[in-house]
Amino acid sequence: MHDARRLRNGGSMDQWMELAMRVQSIAQAGLTYGGTEYDKERYEELRNIAAEMLCVGTEVPVDTVKRFFCNETGYQTPKIDTRAAVFVDGKILMVHEKNGTWSLPGGWCDVDQSVASNTVKETHEEAGLLVKPEKVIAVHDWRKHNRYNLPYGVIKIFVQCSVTGGSFQENIETTETAYFAKDALPSPLAEEKVTAEQIGMCFAAYESSGWKTVLD
């Protein structure tokens, strides 16, 4: 298989994927607001081409991309991911996932949840803890900070939380939890979910009395 990070003209595969996503977004908007059946046929064709382009970068079968990426209706928008930064005695809570990687507790924001309630829900499901959201640390564009391997935009919201109760029980997503100092993070990290730099940012927010939400 060819190298999926560099293109013949010197551009990166991430740039290729971003262009494909822009094409998909235009096609999705056209299908939503387009006038004639002729227009919609062309937009549908354009969306299929975008899906095929994305397969080059993600190495995901085209049928899978179409199933998850081309079945949406309405205007194309990013997905929302919430992550809880839970601190106890100056250390941050992390969960050990079934695949062996470590992450901050969190996940996709359900359609019936707010950012705060989703953060609480995901932390309880993955870490067994009841938490209280205290402040938004950052709102990140996933493409700028995390491993780029999904065919859609993701907005990541990091929320600092305090523990109010609960205890860990092994579940379908995680095998254990632990608290880590900022200079002793576990490995490997689930970098598509959280990076060492983002965890460092969470520590900076925790240690700051006047933290301002990072918008990036």
Image (cartoon, helix red, strand yellow):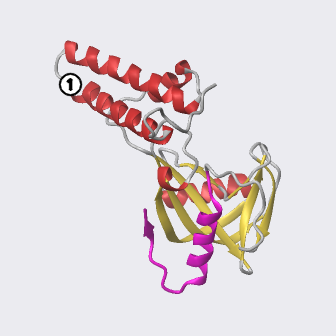
Q: Is residue 65 above or below residue 81?
A: above
Read off the residue under disc 1: 34
Q: Residue at x 57, y 71 (%)?
A: 201
Q: Is residue 139 above or below residue 56?
A: below
Point out the image quarter for the C terminus.
bottom left
Q: Report which quarter residue 51 is drawn in.
A: top left
* Horizontal side, residue 131 vs residue 174: left or right: left
* The magenta segment: 193-216
Query: Residue 144 location in percent, x, y?
Result: 48, 54
Q: Between residues 27 and 116, which one lies in front from this camera angle?
A: 27
The image shows a total of numbered marks equal to 1
Residue 192 shows in this picture: yes
Q: Residue furthest left?
A: 35
Q: Report which quarter residue 26 is drawn in.
A: top left
Query: Residue 93 location in percent, x, y?
Result: 72, 66
Residue 205 falls within the magenta-colored stretch: yes
Q: Residue at x 59, y 27 (%)?
A: 60
Q: Between residues 137 and 109, which one lies in front from this camera angle?
A: 137
Q: Residue at x 43, y 41 (%)?
A: 15
Q: Residue furthest bottom?
A: 209
Query: The residue tagged with tag 1: helix, strand or loop?
Result: loop
Q: Between residues 215 and 135, which one lies in front from this camera angle?
A: 215
Q: Residue at x 50, y 59 (%)?
A: 157
Residue 163 falls within the magenta-colored stretch: no
* Horizontal side, residue 76 vs residue 113: left or right: left
